[in-house]
Amino acid sequence: MPSFDTVMEPDFVEVKNAIDQAAKEIGNRFDFKGTSAAIELKDKEITMTGDADFQLTQIDDIMRNKLTKRNVDVRFIDMGKVEKIGGDRVKQVATVRSGIASEDGKKIQQVLKGSKLKVQGAIQGDSVRVTGAKRDDLQAAMALIRSEIPDLPLTFNNFRD
């Protein structure tokens, strides 16, 4: 029976390269000279530090620009709160989302059930497997999922005929 997996996985190599490029640009920019502006990636967390909120927005802008240039969807980035870390310095931690949360998986299942397509969705860990009798139904399900859930950067892989 034909099937495919709906997943949410960023290319972590490209994310790391984008963060490295952003750190290099922050080190070279004239307006960041002599400040504590920095960005670093540890596991799935991006830590941005600066002297003021304005600097954090500039660092965020640089990061998003580098991610876009490397074809990484910025919807993978989940921004945290701005925290004061002593003196004038502030920090913001952003997490790189990976895997479909259970609520989002249920939402995908409800979209598939609500449609008139003859497909079924099954949550399997952090992905959703969609099965159907015809390849055309699966392709229509892909289009439906993309249009109904625009806030998640979903990709489809493991297409079996």
Image (cartoon, rainbow, N blue to C red):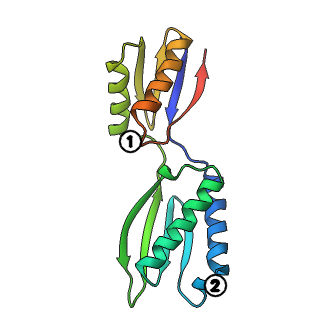
Residue at the image point whose x is 36% and y is 38% from the top: 104
Q: Is residue 58 left or right of residue 69?
A: left
Report the residue marked by disc 2: 30
- Residue 71 x/y as whole percent: 63, 49
Does 6 sit above or below residue 91? above
Residue at the image point whose x is 45% and y is 63% from the top: 94
- Residue 141 x/y as whole percent: 47, 21
Depth order, front residue of 135/33: 33
Does 94 sit above or below residue 23? above
Q: Closer to us: mark 1 or mark 2? A: 2
Depth order, front residue of 143/129: 143
Depth order, front residue of 14/26: 26
- Residue 27 x/y as whole percent: 64, 80
Q: Is residue 87 left or right of residue 2?
A: left
Q: Secondary structure at mark 1?
A: loop
Which comes before the other along the chain, label 1 or label 2? 2
Report the residue marked by disc 1: 101
Which quadrant is home to the C terminus?
top right
Q: Name the image quarter holding residue 63.
A: bottom right
Q: Is residue 53 left or right of residue 68?
A: left
Q: In the rendered structure, which amino acid carries the disc numbered 2?
A: Phe
Residue at the image point whose x is 41% and y is 24% from the top: 122
- Residue 40 x/y as whole percent: 56, 70
- The crowding category of the residue bearing disc 2, from other C-alpha atoms within 10 Å (few below 14, some 14 to 19, many at least 20), is few
Is residue 152 visible to us here? Answer: yes
For the residues labelled 1 and 2, say whether their Cβ atoms are less than 8 Å apart.
no
Q: Secondary structure at mark 2?
A: helix
Does 122 sit above or below residue 47? above
Depth order, front residue of 67/49: 67
Q: In the rendered structure, which amino acid carries the disc numbered 1?
A: Ala
Residue at the image point whose x is 33% and y is 32% from the top: 106
- The crowding category of the residue bearing disc 1, from other C-alpha atoms within 10 Å (few below 14, some 14 to 19, many at least 20), is some
